[in-house]
Amino acid sequence: MKPMSLRAVTKALASAGCTVQRDTGRHTVWTCPCGDHRAPVPRHTEVSAGVVKSIQQQMACLPEGWLQ
C-alpha cells in the first residue's frame, strides 16, 4: 500500500457505493453499501499508507482491489 491523496480515496469510496455517514470533527465517516462497516477518513491532503490499509480492511464487504 502507498499513500494516496484524499481526493483519490473519497473518489474510490464514492464509486464503490459508500456514503458519508457524518462529516464533523477531524474525520469524515464513510459507510459501506451494506451498512455494516464504517471507516473514518482523516481530512488531510494526503492519506498515509497505514491509514489507507486500515480503510481497506474496515470496508471488508467491498470487492478486492476497489481501492486502487
Image (cartoon, rainbow, N blue to C red):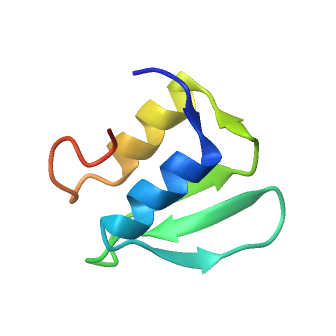
Residue under the point 30% across and 76% down: 33
Residue under the point 74% across and 41% down: 45
Residue under the point 84% across and 64% down: 25
Horizontal side, residue 41 vs residue 14: left or right? right
Q: Could you tell me residue 57's position as x and y percent? A: 34, 41
Residue at the extreme right: 25
Horizontal side, residue 59 vs residue 9: left or right? left
Compared with 32, 68 (above or below) is above
Compared with 3, 24 (above or below) is below
Compared with 65, 33 (above or below) is below
The image quadrant where one finds the C terminus is: top left
Q: How many marks?
A: 0
Q: Please tell me in which quadrant of the rendered image residue 12 appears.
A: bottom left
Q: Please tell me in which quadrant of the rendered image residue 53 appears.
A: top left
Compared with 41, 30 (above or below) is below
Q: Could you tell me residue 38's position as x and y percent? A: 46, 63
Horizontal side, residue 46 vs residue 11: left or right? right
Instruction: State the residue in front, 58 or 52.
Output: 52
The image quadrant where one finds the N terminus is: top left
Q: Please tell me in which quadrant of the rendered image residue 3 appears.
A: top right
Q: Could you tell me residue 24's position as x and y percent? A: 80, 72
Instruction: State the residue in front, 23 or 11.
Output: 11
Q: Could you tell me residue 41's position as x and y percent? A: 61, 52
Residue at the extreme left: 63
